[in-house]
Amino acid sequence: MKSYDDMVDMVLSQYFAGKKTLELGFFSGNHTPRFAKHAGELTSIDVAQASYDLAKKNLSAAEGGMPGNLTLMVMDAAKMAFPDASFHAVVSTSFHEMGASQEAILAECDRVLGLDGADKTLIFSEPDIESITNELFKVFDPKENHAARIVLTKARIQKFASVNGYKILELEPSVSHSKFTTEEELLDEMLAWWSDVKVPADETEAAAMKTRIKEILTHKASRDFKKLSVNEVSWNWVLTKPGLK
């Protein structure tokens, strides 16, 4: 199974290489430099100011600094400020997190795609229904069925494609490797992943949450957790629709 970085470099990049590309939901900016490496111009949006601040900090501190072809913006993907036909391609690794807004976001994507009359392209890379993150999410919100959310996300994308004339290319799964040097670093990062859902009230609660996270990682997901590395399996879909040329 390819790493997600290899999936982008070797497969997905062909759909947005050298093109004006929009990233939906950058969160911490983890995948943004990889997209910027291939895109002609990359505009990355997220609805949360906290995500903008975190991504800007991370990207500025990374080797090479902020990519010169990147524009980072706070914007609601369900109500984009871009004119019609502003981009060639859209990429997203967090569409499953956009919940009830997904249908409006897909409609907006269709509207802002088609620059220069080119084919419209949407690329989705999302956690598999058996991904470790589905179990970990319960630490932050026990009532949330993350796997069910992913199933619903797929159904909404399929419906959108059918209604709007997009073809879906289902590619092989990939895996993202999040590697850490110490167990404490790993557990701290796990708490940060869903800090927008729940922040521990105090050190006692933080310790309890870390214990639960460690139990999940070590006992329920040997495929996804080895040698201080959390490995998230993702599915990859490419939607395409002929342009006006």
Image (cartoon, rainbow, N blue to C red):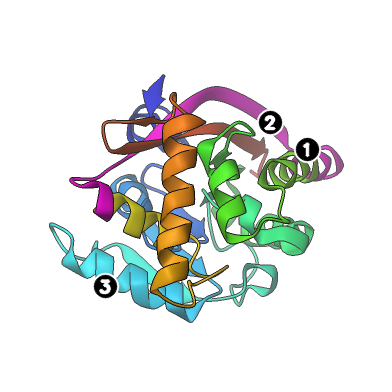
The CA span between labels 1 and 2 is 8 Å
The CA span between labels 2 and 3 is 35 Å
Q: Amino acid at mark 1?
A: Gln
Q: Badge 3 is on which residue? A: 57
Q: Amino acid at mark 2?
A: Ile
Q: Where, by quadrant of the figure, is residue 141 drawn?
A: bottom right
Tag shown at residue 168? 2
Is there any visible trace of residue 123 in the rendered image? no
Q: Residue at x 20, y 47 (%)?
A: 182
| Element carrying mark 3 | helix
Q: Circle 2: is it few (<14), some (14-19), or many (20+) Cα within 10 Å?
A: some
Left or right: residue 18 compared with residue 236:
left
The CA span between labels 1 and 3 is 36 Å
Q: Residue at x 56, y 24 (%)?
A: 171
Left or right: residue 158 compared with residue 77:
right
Mark toward the start of the polypeptide (2 vs 3): 3
Q: Badge 1 is on which residue? A: 158
How many numbered discs?
Answer: 3
- The answer to whether the residue labelled 1 contacts the one labelled 2, judged by CB atoms less than 8 Å apart, is yes
Q: Nearer the viewer, residue 97 or 93?
A: 97
Instruction: Residue lying at the far left in this picture: please name it.
Output: 63
Say if 138 sits above or below 101 in the image: above
Q: Residue at x 18, y 60 (%)?
A: 62
User: Is residue 15 within the magenta segment?
Assistant: no
- Counting from the top left corner in percent of width and height, residue 142 is at 67, 55
Magenta residues (range) = 157-184
